[in-house]
Image (cartoon, rainbow, N blue to C red):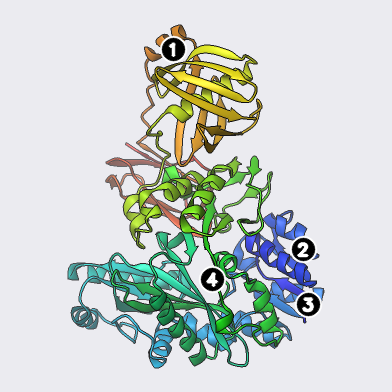
Amino acid sequence: MFKKVLIANRGEVACRIIRTLRRMGIGSVAVYSEPDEGSLHVEMADEAYFIGPALVKESYLNTQAILKAAAQSEVEAIHPGYGFLSENAPFAQAVEDHGFVFIGPLPKTIAAMGDKLEAKRLAQLAKISCLPGTNEPLKELKTAEKIAHEIGYPLMVKAAAGGGGKGMRIVRDPNQLEDALKGAINEARTSFGDGRVFLEKYIDSSRHIEIQILADTSGNVIHLGERECSLQRRYQKVIEEAPSSFVTPSLREAMGNQAVRLAKTVEYSSAGTVEFVVDQNQNFYFLEMNTRLQVEHPVTEMTTGLDLVEEMIRIAAGEPLRLRQSDICITGHAIEARIYSEDSSRGFLPSTGRIRSYLPPLEKEGEIRLESGVREGDIITPYYDPMIAKLIVHQHERDLACDLLLNTLDRFYVRGIATNISFLASLVKSPFFRKGDFSTTTLDELYGEGFTPSPPPNPNIAVGASAVIYCIRNNVNKAEATVLIDREAHPISILTEGECWEVREGNETLIIETKWKSGDVLFQGIFNGHTITIQLDPKGISDILFWNGYAAKTYVVNSQIAELILHMPFNQQLETSRIVIAPMPGLIVEVAVAEGETIKAGQPVAIIEAMKMENIIRATCDGIVENVYIKKGDSVNIDQHLVKIG
């Protein structure tokens, strides 16, 4: 077994790998860029080596810098995590050429499965169910039009290289084909340096189901069941679970058998994932194979009891699989929610800045697991992926897992940066999620413009919590007052006996048991027998309460002041639509307008790169461009003026 392993990654995945190495008694070596010098994964590792400045191509994608750190630290093996160089065949080959062990599959396997056309060819060779489409890159429009007619619309234009949704276009009409081809080719060439694209049949209302496999170097392969990964936004997964409520035992067996057959055909070793697209009639088709650890691997670990990182390490060390297919038992239900540093109310744009408060829920063995790469006081920069943590829960039944995840999200308090926690809570309590009735397009259809927490349908939780908070803050045992929620008045009376409060509004009575103290940011209580946790943000004389994806702004005042407040006018917002501002900090990679140019609402103004994503900034009104305040290559801050429209 290895004595020391280097992790060629950062953030939560580096921390997660270090925990397994520590449990196995293996030394851990971290690498870090300039802004990551004081990060959590550096603190957790036994050793850490600087590999370059903030830009990933000069640090975490810098093969020579990583190999130098490996040589200096005298490690025997390198684990790539996921992202960055994890599916980079030349990197894996360079690791081996320099005498280290790459903890993952062979470089030739990574190369083959990283090329979608080659992967499809190998899948067909293994008699895996594949989508109708082309097996060669498209070179001219006429050929594409002929093949599209044979396949039938809708169809998908896909880049042969890369991933992450780049170089992909859905085409529903022949008139869209030419523009889709040009757009996909340009995006693929820019993103991956490879402009090859091909066509495949597109399935509406499909599911994204993936099979986790393990394979050793002796040809032994098993699968660990499926993961449901259909809840995606712009091709990026948001919530994953295992097993899928959509998959039947017979479908699981058929998909698992095909995944194992493909792994054997390509001589796979290590942990890997075979991804399928499944239609509403449970017909399934090969999508791609990921030759690395997946972000969502913890749900498989929670339902099987395995540590996939440990299995990868043992396989890389030459050990045979310790399990047979008959040994795999899937127990209970696990759900993972990805915590992103993003502003849901601004169309899910990345959010950067210092984490002022970070109070994650406590972990509980076998039930609640947190994979995090940040701490209170850390700075979220625009250079890396916006995912800062993953919250995973496990229960005997799916409904119980949903309840636990919702309650745990409400206890995940992060301030200083915007996060998607309220959005996740809203999803988990939604009827479509509870029923398991969703597809890969559900989130884009429902939340294409973003998400803002809605007022609660029944205000009594907010009314009761605000009344109790008011009394505890003012050290009174009873009161007659009015709770205002968004200018709606709720006259209440409240009294207490110890930790039990009685709040009355008209004929309704709410009994609240709580140990809340003034200054606590989480109000945890039992409301008429139901446990609820509310996040509390004081704002002057008001409070903003967040729970279950809801938000309510409350005031507690006497009846006379309530009457006056209700008659006060709203503040009128200044007209700002003619100034285009930066919605996030980042790098200007393109300026799309010039002074004096006529512009229409919705027209691109600039492209800002932040957190590995390019964000198109558009005009909000028609007019003539009066001033352009930026140029390509500029770094901008949030709310900085970009363009003025006259």
Disc number lying in front (1 or 3): 1
* Sequence-earlier tag: 4 or 2: 2
How far, Cα to Cα, is label 2 from label 3? 13 Å
> In this orientation, does residue 606 appear?
yes
Question: Residue 461: x, y in percent?
Answer: 47, 30
> In this orientation, does residue 542 appear?
no
Could you tell whether 141 is left or right of 94 in the image?
Answer: left
How far, Cα to Cα, is label 1 from label 3? 68 Å
* Residue farthest to the top, as pictured: 560
* Sequence-earlier tag: 1 or 2: 2
Task: Tell me the number on the disc at residue 191.
Answer: none
Residue beneath the point at 60% across and 44% down: 353
Residue carrying label 4: 330
Residue carrying label 1: 562
Disc number lying in front (4 or 2): 4
Disc 2 is placed on an element classified as: loop
Displayed quadrant of residue 320: bottom right
Disc number lying in front (1 or 4): 4
Given the image, on which type of amino acid does mark 4 rest?
A: Ile
Displayed quadrant of residue 491: top left
Disc 4 is placed on an element classified as: loop
Task: Tell me the number on the disc at residue 75.
Answer: 3
**Placement of the N terminus among the 4 image quadrants:** bottom right
Disc number lying in front (1 or 2): 1
Q: Residues within 10 Å of mark 1 (few under 14, many from 20)?
A: many
Disc number lying in front (4 or 3): 4
Residue carrying label 2: 45
* Sequence-earlier tag: 1 or 4: 4
* Sequence-earlier tag: 2 or 3: 2
Question: Residue 203: x, y in percent?
Answer: 29, 70
Disc 3 is placed on an element classified as: loop
Question: Residue 471: x, y in percent?
Answer: 59, 18
